[in-house]
Image (cartoon, grey):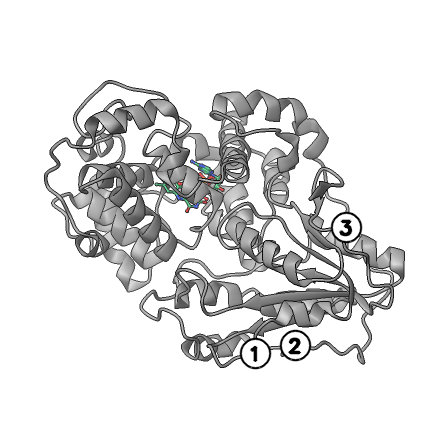
Amino acid sequence: MIQISERVQLLNDKPANNDGKYVLYWMQMFKRAEYNHALNFAVERANERRLPVVVYEGLKYYYPWASDRIHTFILEGVAEKRKAFEKLGIKYVFYLQKDERSPKDTVARIARDAALIVTDDFPCFIIPRHNAAIVRKAEIPVYAVDSNGVVPMSRFEKEEYAAYTIRPKIKKMLGDYLKPFEEVKPLVRAGENLKIDCPDTDVAENGIEKLVAGCAIDHTVKPSFVYRGGTANGRRRLKKFVAEILPDYDAARNRPERDGSSRLSAYLHFGYLSALEIALAVRDADAPAASKEAYLEELIVRRELSYNFTRFNPDYDSLKSLPPWVQETMRRHADDHRAPVYTLDELEAGRTYDELWNAAQREMVVTGEMHNYVRMLWGKNVIGWTRSYEEAFAILEHLNNKYCLDGRNPNSYAGILWCFGKHDRPWMERPVFGTIRYMTSASTGKKFDSKRYIEWTKTLAQGKLF
Ligand SMILES: Cc1cc2nc3c(=O)[nH]c(=O)nc-3n(C[C@H](O)[C@H](O)[C@H](O)COP(=O)(O)OP(=O)(O)OC[C@H]3O[C@@H](n4cnc5c(N)ncnc54)[C@H](O)[C@@H]3O)c2cc1C
């Protein structure tokens, strides 16, 4: 692997196919036609070779936690991309692999006629494995491009310890990156007769339910009635956020009973919106400086700390990635008595004695998201209610990634592990938690109108948000 520029890595040393008919961009996580460094890189390489670009996006049925919710959110973004790419003269192929009888190995098949492959560099979940697999199969160069955050991940040389270590570094570099994005336009349009060796699924707005029903996935996790996939829907929310919510963000973001945060994390996770586009919109907004700063702290410092963590720590999805002080305190408190103890089924059904916790669980199950403030409490409580730290982590990872549209993301792992002390510091010693920061529903619930929040989550099943 060679880092050839701040955002681009060459993953192998194969020669380009000079008879290639196109440059292939395998779009995995940055599901957008603008503000996309990977797409730009593919277009530049194609322009150099006077070739058209083919964008391939696949959706398989067997990724972990595949469900109606996640599939629907992805399919809702397909039609707008087809339109955008058609306008640009880029060939877009979307393939929905429904079950084990469906054609396989599509990327390798499309790659046979490509000069080279460009794909997304996303530091977590199934993407690093996908990229390793295509490197094994491809006989042409494979480039992975980082379009995750405002500052490229390669600007950090190692795993950062906490927000206070990454923050000054980001602040120093931000001026270089918080700039309008320059889109590169393709010089050669993909012709009508360009044949691609892969099925192309027709995804019409009104056919999504049927397509999803035909896939061998978990049909019990229903599509979100709050979040609709796609860049246009993400931009609609961004516009509303900047105009109506951002001015009061600093005060309202820790009020789960209000619509006081951006609710953009699902759009960020699936790459429908780029962090840069959001950051520029917030920077240029007519809003108090304190709110803008508070928002950019979350969007850039906290989020990029998570990406740094999963990029540099191979154990990001286990307790092994926790710092020595946490390992030590967990060793000392592993055998502490826990009561009550709940099973995964009880937790999943939101059947605990704690009404606030049950409400947070309900919000996640119904809407596909849980508010940040209760998410911290949600994670902390599970540590106290399970037989071991390992079991608590496994349950949190499973529930977060199964129900949350923004799950399976670096923020998922950094967020869950934060509940165990990651990116935090030791606090006062107590049973079970040792020196890991402790939170109770009783004290957290006093910091906002928890009664209203609990009642609000009960109305969610009627399909109304606020
Ligand atoms: C137990 C636990 C699990 C979590 N799981 C996820 C997850 O699966 N996916 C996810 O994106 N976030 C996760 N977070 C972080 C945070 O809760 C969400 O990013 C936030 O709730 C998203 O809502 P929002 O878009 O309205 O945030 P806003 O307050 O509007 O913030 C703007 C953006 O900044 C980023 N951000 C906000 N808070 C954090 C944070 N603490 N750490 C890193 N980035 C942050 C997000 O990208 C967010 O969209 C988790 C936190 C905890 C404690």
- Residue 341: image quadrant is top left
- The residue labelled by disc 3 is 183
Q: Marks 1 and 2: in contact by CB < 8 Å?
A: yes
Mark 2 or 1, which is nearer the eye?
1
Q: Answer with the quadrant where ligand 1 appears in the image.
A: top left
Viewer-nearest residue: 451 or 163: 163
Indicate left or right for 301 with 333 as reference.
right
Q: Is residue 400 above or below residue 71?
A: above
Dot 1 or dot 3: first in sequence order is 1
View extreme (top): residue = 428
Tell me the crowding category of disc 3: few under 14, some 14 to 19, or many 20 or more residues within 10 angstroms, Cα based: some
Q: Which label sits on residue 198?
A: 2
Front: mark 2 or 3: 2
Element type where label 1 sits in the image: loop
Q: Give me the residue at 48% from left, 63% from top.
A: 73
State whether residue 209 is above or below residue 170: below
Q: Label 1 to label 3, Cα distance in Å?
A: 34 Å
Residue 368 visible? The answer is: no
Q: Position of residue 150 (x, y in %)?
A: 63, 37
Of the numbered discs 2 and 1, the one sitting upstream in the chain is: 1
* Distance from Cα at disc 2 to Cα at disc 1: 8 Å
Label placed on residue 103: 1
Give amino acid for label 3. Glu
Left of 117 or right of it: where is 387?
A: left
Residue 235 shows in the view: yes
**Mark 3 CB in 8 Å range of ligand 1?**
no
Pinpoint residue 132: horizontal percent, then vertical percent.
Answer: 60, 54
